[in-house]
Image (cartoon, grey):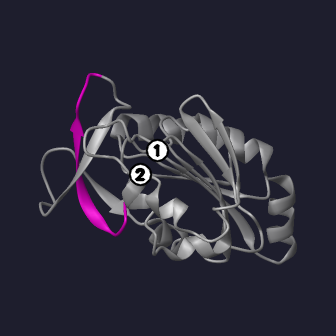
Amino acid sequence: MRSRIAEVAGQGRKPLIIDGGGNIGLAARAFATEYPLAQVVCVEPDAANNALAVENTRTCTNVAVLRAALWSHEAVLDLQDGSVDTWAYKYSETAEQNGGNKVDALSIDSLIARFPGTELVLLKLDIEGAEKQALHKDARFWAARPIIYVEPHDWFDGHSGSLTGLLSQPGYHNADWIISGENILVFPATTGP
């Protein structure tokens, strides 16, 4: 990770870390402290968690906190709380702009476009079943071959194949995969298929 950040910075681009499903911002704060050359973007759809993320990262000048969700394209999502836990939201796209628990959704590509001059080096996703949408196989961000840190939620009803987009990308077939509990860390090959 350090060498990738140094390489991107040495080429005149700002290393970008996206913390999708950033919860209360603790991972974003840790990334910002550990990698001060990077721009860290914490994306959290839940209003209460987002407010805590803003508070928890307020001293980090290299962190931006957005109240949004990650998806395959720009849309409006209705957050449906399937349990009593604020981390357990499920998303569904809606045509309605107001009412209920609505949040703007962004593709990873459109999120990156909000931070010109950056290059994605790490994509962390804990987005409660929206991995398949966010890791869309035709997304432009794959060209940067970012490190992927994901908690897949294939066990959620109707959410199988969450890593299909990832598995279809060159450089991820012969990647180094580390599986720890429910998380997968993928270091793509820098060259070759």
Q: Residue furthest top?
A: 84
Badge 1 is on which residue?
21
For residue 116: magenta?
A: no
Query: What's the mark number on residue 130?
Result: none
Q: In terms of secondary structure, where does tag 2 sit?
A: loop
Query: Relative to 100, does residue 18 appear above or below in the rendering?
Result: below
Residue 90 in which image quadrant: top left
Residue 95, position as x, y percentages in the image: 13, 64
Magenta residues (range): 70-84
Q: Estimate the spatial distance between the alpha carbons at disc 2 and disc 1, rounded to whole Å.
A: 15 Å
Query: Relative to 121, does residue 43 appear above or below in the rendering?
Result: above
Residue 138, position as x, y percentages in the image: 45, 75
Question: Decide: marks 2, 1 in contact (CB < 8 A)?
Answer: no
- Which residue is nearer to you in this view: 172 or 144? 172
Residue 131 in view here: yes
In the displayed structure, does residue 140 sit left or right of residue 10?
Answer: left
> Could you tell me which residue is drawn at 81 percent across and 61 percent down?
4
Residue 42, position as x, y percentages in the image: 53, 49
Q: Amino acid at mark 2?
A: Ser
Query: Relative to 148, does residue 137 appear above or below in the rendering?
Result: below
Specify the quadrant that holds the C terminus.
Answer: bottom right
**Closer to the eye: label 2 or 1:** 2
Badge 2 is on which residue?
162
